[in-house]
Amino acid sequence: DTEVTQTPKHLVMGMTNKKSLKCEQHMGHRAMYWYKQKAKKPPELMFVYSYEKLSINESVPSRFSPECPNSSLLNLHLHALQPEDSALYLCASRGPLQNTEAFFGQGTRLTVV
Amino acid sequence: DAKTTQPTSMDCAEGRAANLPCNHSTISGNEYVYWYRQIHSQGPQYIIHGLKNNETNEMASLIITEDRKSSTLILPHATLRDTAVYYCIVRASNFGNEKLTFGTGTRLTIIP
């Protein structure tokens, strides 16, 4: 199994809603990533978890809250988002060895109305 | 992580070899060169990576210059399905450095 599975594929939420994005992998990877991608731009790193601990937060606003409940699962909790937060949210995983490639999910297309 | 520079866009005729350059003049000794591509609205896909030797797999070849300041990704027989944005990324392999940062990439269009 070399897949990173993201759910849902599409999400529409209001600015007062609370929602969560989910990412799952069963490859034994110990680093997991959240990226945000706007149209025609490269993916922008948001968070990195290493061995289930948050190791990198790229100064992401607190309305985005990551969580890594176990080594296979990564969540991104969303609250009080703005329309400009509409984007493709990508999850990736890598490891456990250092010199390995990252596997990406197909993303969640988020629209904030 | 070292910064990379890639051309914004390139065209290549179907069936020909596509050669995508990448400059990484500030690369450090423990940093690898990775290539990913992203087909429209899909998640990025790993292609190949290397440290200092040339590498080849079923998808592509990676040629790294002797001084490691630049590299070229070669798709030997480009098809229409190779139309995508190609990203060259340099990242360290030391434990604890998990950052994987994308540059602007090259938009490759395969022409029928």
Image: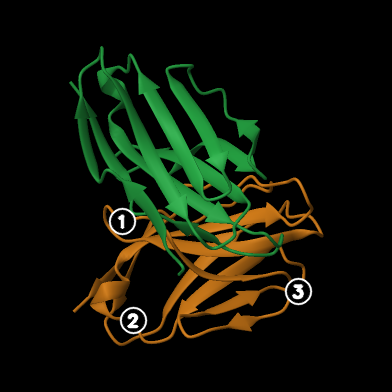
Chain colours: A green, B orange
Q: Nearer the viewer, residue B78 or A4?
A: A4
Q: Nearer the viewer, residue B27 or A45?
A: A45
> Distance of mark 1 from mark 3, alpha carbons?
34 Å
Residue drawn where x is 27% and y is 52% of the image:
B41
Q: Of label 1 and label 3, which has the lower sequence position?
A: 1
Q: How many marks?
A: 3
Residue A20 figure quarter: top left
Tell me if residue B32 comes above or below residue B2 in the rendering: below
Q: Chain of mark 2?
A: B
- SS for dot 2: loop
Residue under pointer 1: B42
Q: Are marks 1 and 2 in contact (CB under 8 Å)?
A: no
For residue A33, say whether it is visible. Answer: yes
Residue drawn where x is 34% and y is 81% of the image:
B78
Residue under pointer 3: B66
Q: Chain of mark 3?
A: B
> Distance of mark 1 from mark 2, alpha carbons?
19 Å
Query: What's the residue type where badge 2 is placed?
Result: Ala
Q: Quadrant of the C terminus of chain B?
A: bottom left
Residue drawn where x is 31% and y is 61% of the image:
B39
Query: What's the residue type where badge 1 is placed?
Result: Gln
Q: From the viewer's perspective, is A52 left or right of B11?
A: right
